[in-house]
Amino acid sequence: MADIALLETELTDDPLARGYAGMTNQAAADDLNLRIYDGRADSGTLFTYLAKETSKDDATEPFASHILGRMYRVDGAGAAGIGTPTFGAGSPPFSELSAEGLDACRTLLQIALNDRLNAVSEVMTEAKFIALLDRVKDTGVMKPSDVTAIQLLSQNKQTRGEVIGFNFVGEGDVWDVRNG
């Protein structure tokens, strides 16, 4: 159960200047339930995604393999693998491993292994993160849909209620705080 004192502090102090004092109970509850805050991705979400999801090029590969395993194979090839065919090499747009693709795979692998998805926005813009994911995709390690899924993992929109520990703030919760 959520701590009602946290909700009371939120409504009384209004730390984000949302204007709770001038809102009805329902309006305050609705405001607290808006998914507008950038939350932190759950611990391990990127690693879990890469370990669970598979990728396969039907034209050239007999079976699907996990993205994480593919990333390790690219990492293991290292500089010696640059210029050699990668996953899905027989089917465009994948062709040869580039230095940029190798670096992108290694970077994403380190982000996943060190559970640093939450810190990505501190070191690169969203556009640069998407470009990084696109370079990984171009190696054949993952599909275009994986780029979108990982991008969404990093955003994790939350409500203000969730940020302060409530799954959902109802009109009655606000009434209880105000009339407590």
Image (spheres, grey):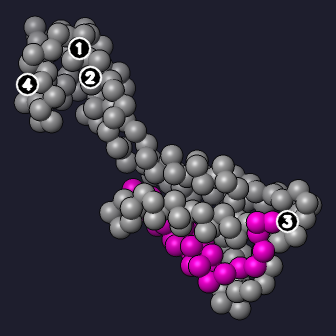
Q: Looking at this view, name the residue that lies furthest to the front.
A: 92
Q: Which residue is mark 1?
A: 27
Residue 177 position (above or below residue 6): above
* Distance from the alpha carbon under mark 3 to that under mark 1: 54 Å
> Regarding mark 4 in the picture, which secondary structure is present there?
helix
Q: Amino acid at mark 3?
A: Ser
Magenta residues (range):
92-119
Residue 162: x and y in percent read 33, 32
> Between tags 2 and 3, which lies in front?
3
> Between tags 3 and 1, which lies in front?
3
- Quadrant assignment for the C terminus: top left
Q: Earlier in the sequence, mark 2 or mark 3?
A: 2
Q: Looking at this view, name the residue that lies furthest to the bottom.
A: 80
Q: Which residue is mark 4?
A: 12
Q: Main secondary structure of the magenta part?
A: helix
> Between tags 1 and 4, which lies in front?
1
Q: Specify the quadrant of the image occupied by residue 28.
A: top left
Mark 3: give few (<14), some (14-19) or many (20+) Cα within 10 Å.
Answer: few
Do the numbered discs 2 and 3 sit on residues whose CB atoms are within 8 Å? no
Q: Which residue is mark 2?
A: 31
Mark 2: give few (<14), some (14-19) or many (20+) Cα within 10 Å.
Answer: some
For residue 91, the mark is 3
Residue 99 position (above or below residue 14): below
Query: In percent of the image, x 10 and y 8: which residue is there?
Result: 179
Q: Amino acid at mark 4?
A: Thr
Q: Amino acid at mark 1?
A: Ala
